[in-house]
């Protein structure tokens, strides 16, 4: 197994995010959105599985995976914002969380924590959940809840990073 295949699976999520955005802008067909979302999830599962199975886990590959995850999240969330189903500030929350994750991970291997991973799952699921619910008020509540969780996660990571550096 070649690392480039695993990376291609990761990069495919950028395309799926773009396809999600285009599907929302052009058609808004929920069936297509579910298929695109399912393919993105499948690519995420498969790249991790193959990397572990064939011993291809490397720092750069992990970083590519995380960046591709967040680009999928940004594209698909932008689609939800585009149709005015979610507030635009939520995209800034996502971007700041990605920056914080890399900064608090430091150099070398990325550092994961359970709560931060949970927040990433919430970011990941938000666009398809918002499209399925199709209620601006409910998605606003969801963005507020996810934002509170993201801020809490960031504060905990910053605190833990400072404690380790002291």
Image (cartoon, grey):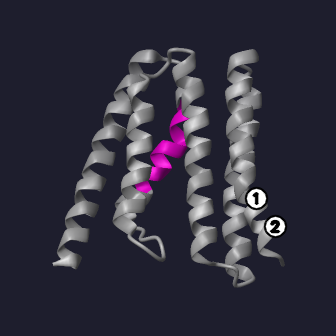
Whether residue 119 is visible, yes or no, is: no
Q: Provide the residue designation for mark 2.
A: 5
The x and y percentages for residue 137 are: 39, 17
Q: Quadrant of residue 76?
A: top right
The answer for how far apart the CA atoms under marks 2 and 1 are is 6 Å
> Is 112 rendered above or below residue 37?
below
Q: Secondary structure at mark 2?
A: helix
- Please say whether residue 126 is one of the residues in the magenta stretch: yes
From the viewer's perspective, is 134 left or right of 21? left
Q: Residues within 10 Å of mark 2 (few under 14, many from 20)?
A: few
Residue at horizontal 62%, vertical 43%?
72
Whether residue 136 is visible, yes or no, is: yes
Q: Provide the residue designation for mark 1.
A: 9
From the viewer's perspective, is 74 left or right of 34? left
Q: Quadrant of residue 91?
A: top left
Identify which residue, 18 or 133, lies in the foreground. Answer: 18
- Please say whether residue 117 is one of the residues in the magenta stretch: no
Magenta residues, start to end: 118-129
Residue projecting furthest to the bottom: 55
Identify which residue, 7 or 150, lies in the foreground. Answer: 7
> Is 40 rendered above or below residue 27?
below
Q: Secondary structure at mark 1?
A: helix
From the viewer's perspective, is 24 left or right of 129? right
Q: In the rendering, which numbered label is found on residue 53?
A: none
Residue at horizontal 74%, vertical 25%?
23
Residue at horizontal 42%, vertical 68%?
112
């Amino acid at each position: 197994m070649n690392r480039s295949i695993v990376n291609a699976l990761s990069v495919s999520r950028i395309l799926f995010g773009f396809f999600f955005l285009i599907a929302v802008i052009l058609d808004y067909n929920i069936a297509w959105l579910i298929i695109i979302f399912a393919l993105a999830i499948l690519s995420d599962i498969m790249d991790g599985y193959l990397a572990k199975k064939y011993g291809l886990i490397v720092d750069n590959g992990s970083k590519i995976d995380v960046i591709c995850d967040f680009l999928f999240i940004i594209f698909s969330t932008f689609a939800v914002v585009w149709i005015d189903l979610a507030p635009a500030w939520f995209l800034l929350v996502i971007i700041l969380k990605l920056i914080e994750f890399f900064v608090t991970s430091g150099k070398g291997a990325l550092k994961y924590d359970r709560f931060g991973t949970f927040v990433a799952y919430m970011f990941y699921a938000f666009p398809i959940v918002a499209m399925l619910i199709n209620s601006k008020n409910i998605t606003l509540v969801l963005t507020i809840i996810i934002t509170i969780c993201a801020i809490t996660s960031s504060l905990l990571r910053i605190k833990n990073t400072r404690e380790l550096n002291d």
